[in-house]
């Protein structure tokens, strides 16, 4: 450490001597130039910062506390990963349910039950002009149909075609 301080003092002394020499050497010239040279010399000076570090040995008790904390953190990390996996599974299940709900609301069109819409019971508000719906086979046979005004209800099975026109929005019910 002594040599670092001595080196700092030497660098500082050299910088001061340099500035004095510049000032004396330019004494005969314009004062503005002297000031410019001094400012340029100051800008080139570097600052030296001294840092001392000390190594401290931990006691056996302190090491035991640190190891206990590390073990506790490891256990918490494992528990957190398990909770994260459980939440990921829940989120996937919720996304599947949301897709089913989204497919469980539909309007006019022809739908393949089990692919386009889930099987089950549906209700629609109907319309004043006449609502038509039809359950059919893929071969074109009509299983059941309805034409009328007002609220309507239909139960559809997997593999059937469900056709609807002017009944409004169907929803599970």
Image (cartoon, rainbow, N blue to C red):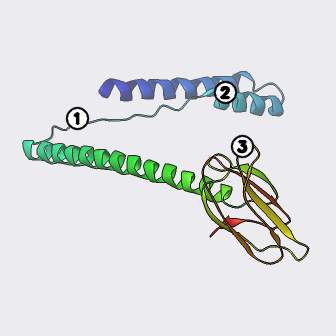
Quick one: 147 or 77, which is closer to the camera?
147
**Residue at x-position 39% and y-position 50%:** 86
Residue contact between numbered discs 1 and 3, judged by CB atoms under 8 Å:
no
Q: Residues within 10 Å of mark 3 (few under 14, many from 20)?
A: few
Is 148 on the left-hand or right-hand side of 102?
right
Foreground residue among 74 and 141: 141
| Marked residue nearer the N-terminal end (1 or 2) | 2
Q: Secondary structure at mark 2?
A: helix
The percent coordinates of residue 154 (x first, y second) are 68, 66
Front tag of 1 and 3? 3
Q: Give the residue at mark 3.
A: 138
* Pair 2/3: label in front: 3
The quadrant of the rendering that contains the N terminus is top left
- Badge number at residue 101: none
Q: Residue at x 15, y 41 (%)?
A: 58
Q: CA distance from mark 1 to mark 3?
A: 82 Å
Residue corresponding to mark 2 = 41
Residue 55: mark: 1
Element on which disc 1 rests: loop
Provide residue 111's location: percent of width, then percent of height.
Answer: 73, 50
Q: Is residue 8 left or right of residue 134?
A: left
The part of the image, by quadrant, that contains residue 171 is: bottom right
The image quadrant that residue 167 belongs to is: bottom right
Task: Using the numbered discs, state the Cα–Cα distance from disc 2 to disc 3 in whole angstroms.
Answer: 93 Å
Indicate left or right for 18 with 136 as reference.
left
Give the camera-side residue of 130 and 86: 130
Quick one: SS at disc 3?
loop
Where in the figure is residue 97, as x and y percent of width and height?
A: 55, 56
């Amino acid at each position: 450490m002594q040599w670092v301080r001595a080196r700092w003092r030497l660098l500082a002394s050299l910088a001061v001597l340099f500035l004095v020499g510049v000032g004396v050497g330019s004494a005969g010239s314009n004062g503005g130039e002297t000031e410019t040279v001094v400012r340029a010399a100051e800008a080139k000076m570097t600052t030296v910062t001294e840092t001392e570090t000390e190594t401290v040995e931990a006691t056996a008790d302190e090491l035991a506390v640190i190891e206990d904390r590390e073990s506790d953190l490891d256990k918490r990390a494992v528990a957190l990963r398990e909770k994260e996996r459980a939440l990921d599974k829940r989120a996937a299940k919720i996304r599947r349910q949301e897709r089913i709900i989204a497919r469980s609301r539909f309007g006019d069109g022809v739908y393949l039950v089990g692919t386009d819409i889930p099987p089950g019971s549906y209700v629609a508000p109907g319309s004043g002009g006449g609502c038509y719906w039809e359950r059919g086979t893929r071969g074109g046979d009509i299983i059941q149909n309805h034409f009328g005004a007002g609220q309507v209800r239909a139960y559809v099975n997997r593999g059937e075609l469900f056709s609807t026109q002017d009944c409004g929005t169907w929803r599970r019910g």
